Amino acid sequence: MQHAHTGLYQPMSYELTMWTMRMAHRNASSSEEGIPVATATIMVKGMTCSGCVNSVTKALKGVKGVQEANVDLQAQTATVTFDESQTSVAQLKQAIEEAGYDTE
């Protein structure tokens, strides 16, 4: 940001920076068409290795409407961003269970 009279650079305020970050996140979480987007974190039991993480990730990404799936071996969770008009948490859990893992 340029100062109007001196041409000196002034950094954005903390509040404006945080607002900008929130707006960027908000815009990334909604579509131009108004499609309802949700994020769910699901507990996944039975994962023991990176192969398990890959299997759960592949199962989730195979569900219609899933935009992003992040599986954490240590936390035993899957965080999924999805289009609520195309799938549900119940369907996500079903995909995980069909891949051979238990969910909560």
Image (cartoon, grey):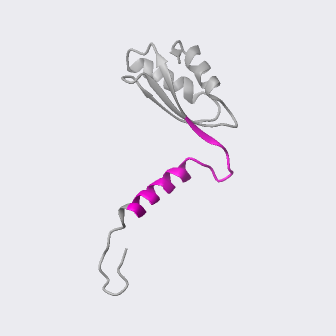
Residue 90 location, x and y as percent?
63, 23
Image point (36%, 67%), residue name? 12
Q: Is 16 within the magenta?
A: yes
Residue 86 location, x and y as percent?
69, 34
Q: Nearer the viewer, residue 78 or 61?
A: 78
Image point (42%, 21%), residue name? 76
Residue 6 location, x and y as percent?
30, 86
Q: Dividing the picture into quarters, in which one does residue 7 lie?
A: bottom left
Q: Measured along the vertical axis of the image, is residue 8 above or below residue 57?
A: below
Q: Measured along the vertical axis of the image, is residue 58 above or below residue 68?
A: above
Farthest-out residue, bottom: 5
Q: State left or right for residue 92 relative to residue 11.
A: right
Q: Measured along the vertical axis of the image, is residue 7 above or below residue 21?
A: below
Specify start and end residues of the magenta stretch as a single range.
15-39
Q: State left or right for residue 29 relative to residue 22.
A: right
Q: Is 43 within the magenta?
A: no
Image point (44%, 18%), residue name? 52
Farthest-out residue, front: 15
- The quadrant the N terminus occupies is bottom left
Image point (39%, 24%), residue name? 75
Q: Dividing the picture into quarters, in which one does residue 89 lie?
A: top right
Count the labels in the image: 0
